[in-house]
């Protein structure tokens, strides 16, 4: 092993607003607001307090212009995103540079069906079916396990992200290789546009049968992401799982926030539940 010391000077660092806003069309919009920090500083989750000036446009029409109080670093807006619409957010706090972000809500809500659950000594295999639309879509799979966990003498309702794997060739190769286990995966419909596709998702039994945990049901979530959100997640996966290898590349993770960091994104989703 070898070590190398690199000079570091944070005097020129200028903090920016960081926006954490990933919005489903079936929920009220939430905007997380925090500050960027220098490399050696420990970030604080709720460093910002007080009021933000918020302006929200829908399809270039004013929805909201108000000064809103941050509650634990978050603002909840009294609106649900309308599929097919375009939203613009402008936000300012104190003397930090004001941010601006624009994203569109996917028009279609994805169609997902769980056809069969197979079991063997090692895996649960969920055979799912996705019905695609005629326009190009960008999708994300997620898997969650819900159950009760025994903590001391209390039984607590608990949810875990559930790793899964698949050998289906539609998943992008930057996801730790297509055979690796992940809690979410990205794919497009360029090769099967407007058709149905059967996909196998494999989950290790050991990931479900945790100590002191009684599983109740699995959720499989298929999300239709805006192009901006898909690009952000693809860049995130590329940096996390490819960086350092022979094909490594560092991509821009500033998101779609002008004069700031993070993301203001939209998606639609279909959630399917299967009892165990």
Image (spheres, helix red, strand yellow):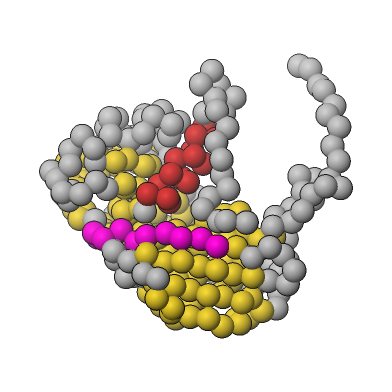
Along the viewing direction, whichever of 194 and 100 lies nearer the viewer: 100
Front residue of 208/3: it is: 3
Residue 184 screen position, x and y as percent: 40, 45
Q: In this view, does 134 lie above or below 247?
A: below
Quarter of the rendering occupied by the N terminus: top right
Is-magenta flag for residue 16?
no
Among all residues in the image, which is located at the extreme left? 195
In this rendering, the answer to whether 179 lies above or below 229 is: above
In the image, what residue occupies the spot 68% across and 63% down? 97
Q: Residue 235: where, in percent of width, then height?
A: 49, 39
65 w.r.t. 147: above or below: below
* Observer able to see residue 150: no
102 part of magenta stretch: yes
262 displayed left or right of 2: left
Q: Give the range drawn in magenta.
A: 100-109
Measured as percent of width and height from the top left, residue 274 is found at 26, 57
Q: Which of 94 and 222 is in front in this view?
A: 94
């Amino acid at each position: 092993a070898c070590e190398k010391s690199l000079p570091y000077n944070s005097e020129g660092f200028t903090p920016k607003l960081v926006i954490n806003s990933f919005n489903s069309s079936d929920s009220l919009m939430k905007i997380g607001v925090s500050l960027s920090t220098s490399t050696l500083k420990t970030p604080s989750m709720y460093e910002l307090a007080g009021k933000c000036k918020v302006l929200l446009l829908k399809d270039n029409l004013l929805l909201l212009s108000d000064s809103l109080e941050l509650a634990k670093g978050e603002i909840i807006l009294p609106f649900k995103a309308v599929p097919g619409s375009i939203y613009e957010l402008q936000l300012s706090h104190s003397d930090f540079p004001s941010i601006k972000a624009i994203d569109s809500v996917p028009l279609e809500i994805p169609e997902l069906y769980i056809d069969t659950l197979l079991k063997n000594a090692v895996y649960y295999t969920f055979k799912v079916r996705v019905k695609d639309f005629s326009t190009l879509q960008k999708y994300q799979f997620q898997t969650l396990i819900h159950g009760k966990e025994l903590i001391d003498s209390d039984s607590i309702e608990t949810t875990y992200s559930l790793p899964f794997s698949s050998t289906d060739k539609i998943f992008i190769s930057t996801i730790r290789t297509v055979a690796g286990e992940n809690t979410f995966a990205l794919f497009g419909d360029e090769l099967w546009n407007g058709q149905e596709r059967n996909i196998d998702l494999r989950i290790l039994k050991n990931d479900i049968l945790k100590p002191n945990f009684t599983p109740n049901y699995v959720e499989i979530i298929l999300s239709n992401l805006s192009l901006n959100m898909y690009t952000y997640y693809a860049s995130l996966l590329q940096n996390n799982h490819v960086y350092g290898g022979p094909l490594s590349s560092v991509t821009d993770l500033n998101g779609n926030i002008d004069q700031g960091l993070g993301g203001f994104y939209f998606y639609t989703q279909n959630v399917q539940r299967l009892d165990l």
